[in-house]
Amino acid sequence: GISISLLVLYVLYVYFQLFTHAALFEDPRAAPEGSEQVQPAEEILLPFSGAMVWLAGATILIAYLSEALTGAIEGTTAQLGISDTFVGFVIIPIIGNAAEHSTAIAMAWKGKMDLAFGVALGSSTQIALFVIPVMVILGWIIDQPMDLYFGVYETVITFLSALIVSHVVGDGETNWLEGAMLLFTYFIICFAFFFYHHDPTRASPADTLTSARLLAEAIGKQ
């Protein structure tokens, strides 16, 4: 039920972004309507049909390479004694999102921060509201037990990470010190996951609710 609700929310988000409030996601530095400034015409490299063919081919190739890469990582981590939690939270996201990371960094280097944030936040939103719910639903269809319970430690780390980033970028301004703080926060989380080994029997959903309540009370006192 929660996964279906998240999918519906993702559809509403896409509709909001593309149709009803598309102006909120446009570049504010673009020339307004009626302005005499002429934007240079962009060269069309591929027609729509050709772009779809290339996109489908790239998707199939990436799916095959991802499967091979995941299998290789599993064998390597088993030999080195690295935990599955570290692989799932650190290694695979870095490798799997390398193209998006490079795009966001390149756009930020060119001063296009709106596009850089759009790439980063769009990827996170797509994973949280689309990919994970789809995986849960597909697991239910093929009789492979999957749920949205990720454990207390993982849930708290994810929540705190989102909270820290929200506070840093909430004012619409940033500087190199805030970027360094975010990088070191990420390194600390990576080190924590390297030494953390998830035990599914260690905590129950009731423990998760208790931890969430205590965390909310601590934030409320601040």
Image (cartoon, helix red, strand yellow):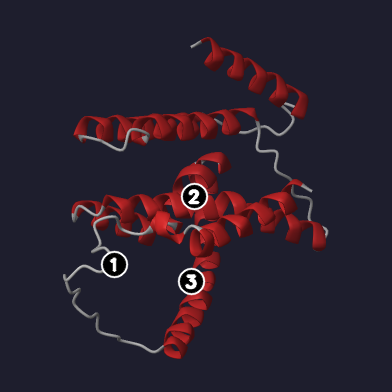
Who comes first in sequence, dot 2 or dot 1?
Answer: 1
Q: Report the front residue among 69 and 21.
A: 21
Q: Up-down: is 97 above or below 189? A: below
Helix, strand or loop at mark 3: helix
Q: Report the front residue among 194 and 32.
A: 32
Residue drawn at the location 51% of the way across and 46% of the way down: 87
Residue drawn at the location 62% of the way across and 59% of the way down: 11
Image coords of residue 193 (percent x, y): 49, 33
Q: What crowding class fits label 2: few (fewer than 14 Cα within 10 Å), some (14-19), or many (20 or more)?
A: few
In the figure, is residue 116 to the left or right of 206? left
Question: Extreme left residue here?
Answer: 37
Image coords of residue 27 (percent x, y): 31, 58
* Residue 92 appearing in the image: no
Q: Up-down: is 96 above or below 50? A: above
Helix, strand or loop at mark 2: helix
Quick check: marks 1 and 3 in contact, CB under 8 Å? no
Image coords of residue 78 (percent x, y): 55, 47
Type of amino acid at the residue the image marks with label 1: Glu
Q: CA distance from mark 2 to mark 1?
A: 32 Å
Q: Which residue is mark 2?
A: 124
Type of amino acid at the residue the image marks with label 3: Ile
Q: Up-down: is 62 above or below 123? A: below
Q: Which residue is mark 1?
A: 33
In the figure, is residue 84 to the left or right of 163? right
Q: Which residue is mark 3?
A: 62
